[in-house]
Amino acid sequence: EAQVTQNPRYLITVTGKKLTVTCSQNMNHEYMSWYRQDPGLGLRQIYYSMNVEVTDKGDVPEGYKVSRKEKRNFPLILESPSPNQTSLYFCASSLGGVDGYTFGSGTRLTVV
Amino acid sequence: ILNVEQSPQSLHVQEGDSTNFTCSFPSSNFYALHWYRWETAKSPEALFVMTLNGDEKKKGRISATLNTKEGYSYLYIKGSQPEDSATYLCAHYGSGNTGKLIFGQGTTLQVKP
């Protein structure tokens, strides 16, 4: 089944404790992206990647890192999480601009 | 327009009503316009990707039009059903095929039986 797999689905952590949210797709998509969703603010792009080793900042990259060492994986790293990073996170992948994105199931992160 | 804007923010209609929403986006550097449907507790799902001025796309009772010169797209739902209740998002690819996809805040549709 073609899909984007995010893990974990739910995570509660403490301020400052490094964490990684994994994202993997099995569709051989070049494009991958991370979004966060907050009430009243919609989906905001954190980072995106056009291919292996090619990443760029979205609109809200502060406090996040990404890497794209393999085509299928695009992990999101929070080196020192803070409470304002409490949010619902989505990973998505696509063949490119004229192809719709396939979204993962989401990761609900709470930082206390 | 610098951002992607959708209106109305929310909409309540009766079953059988037809409805439409608007997505406004910057008309310069246009590459593509996406529409997504997002049901509660699920993930957004792609409905349409539109690239050409005057484009019209249709999927069942849902259709969309695109005007790239003036920077807007309309989504229409004919004969709304309760299962159409969802948030409808549009997203703009405005910097070429770079992966930078900017979403509007969505229109939340509630269809009452």
Image: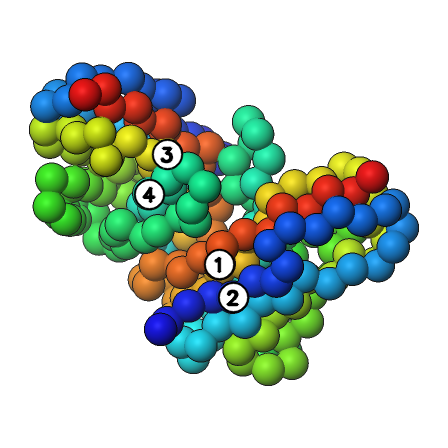
Q: Report whether mark 3 lies on the same chain as mark 4.
A: yes
The amino acid at mark 2 is: Thr
Say which amino acid is labelled 1.
Answer: Gly
| Residue corresponding to mark 4 | B37
On the picture, is B15 further left or further right than B40? left
| Disc assigned to residue A104 | 1
Q: Which amino acid type is shown beneath numbered disc 4?
A: Arg
Q: The disc numbered 2 marks a residue on which chain?
A: A
Q: Nearer the viewer, mark 4 or mark 2?
A: 2
Q: Secondary structure at mark 1?
A: loop
Indicate which disc, 1 or 2, sits on the residue closer to the N terminus: 2
- The residue wearing badge 2 is A5
Q: Secondary structure at mark 4?
A: strand
Q: Quadrant of residue A38?
A: top right
Viewer-nearest residue: B52 or A31? A31
Q: Quadrant of the N terminus of chain A?
A: bottom left
